[in-house]
Image: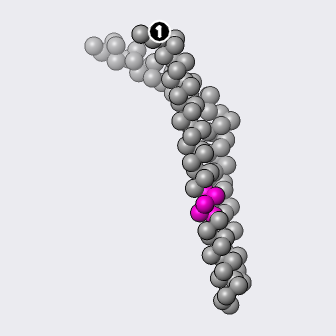
């Protein structure tokens, strides 16, 4: 049986791992989709009368979202996990009083 402290540490580590895994999946999907869009835009420029590099818009827009995901998934993941633990503990204390 796990003690409360060991459980808290395990849950914290699991939450960090899940946040980082989510960012890695997001980054991989971004790389795959953007590669495809760059190829499509390049082919359109090469084989049609289009000369506008429209691929910049999804590249930058989604890139901003990915940057925020990195910021909160890696840089501040520990803070987010601690806040989540405190919210769970507060909820447990409130529900214990109701029962």
Q: Which residue is mark 1?
A: 3
Q: Residue at x 68, y 61 (%)?
A: 60
The answer to whether residue 80 is above or below residue 6 is below
* Residue 33 covered by magenta stretch: yes
Query: Which element type, helix, strand or loop, lies under badge 1?
Result: loop
Residue bounds of the magenta highlight: 30-34
Q: Is residue 79 above or below residue 33?
A: above
Q: Residue 98, located in which quarter of the rendered image?
A: top left
Q: Is residue 52 left or right of residue 14?
A: right
- Is residue 66 visible to us here? yes
Please give the count of numbered marks on the rendered protein: 1
Image location (x, y in percent) of residue 3: 47, 9
Name the one closer to the observer, 42 or 51: 42
**Any magenta on residue 90?**
no
Percent across and percent down for residue 34 are 63, 64
**Closer-to-camera residue (49/43):** 43
Q: Residue furthest bottom?
A: 49
The image quadrant that residue 52 belongs to is bottom right
Q: Is residue 62 visible?
A: no
* Furthest residue toward left: 99
Quadrant of image for the N terminus: top left
Instruction: Assign the magenta stretch its main secondary structure.
Output: helix
20 to 6, vertically: above or below: below
**Residue shown at the point (69%, 68%) measured from the top left:** 56
Residue at the (62%, 28%) spot, across then down: 78
Residue 65 screen position, x and y as percent: 62, 52
Check disc 1: other Cα within 10 Å, few if <14, some if 14-19, many if 20+.
few
Q: Position of residue 55 (x, y in %)?
A: 66, 71
């Amino acid at each position: 049986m796990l003690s409360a402290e060991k459980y808290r540490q395990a849950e914290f580590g699991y939450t960090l791992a899940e946040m980082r895994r989510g960012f890695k999946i997001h980054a991989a999907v971004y790389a795959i989709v953007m590669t495809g869009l760059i190829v499509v835009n390049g082919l359109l420029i090469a084989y049609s009368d289009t000369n506008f590099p429209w691929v910049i818009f999804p590249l930058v827009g989604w890139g901003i979202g990915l940057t925020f995901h990195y910021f909160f998934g890696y840089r501040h993941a520990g803070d987010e996990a601690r806040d989540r633990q405190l919210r769970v503990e507060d909820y447990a204390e409130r529900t214990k009083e109701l029962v």
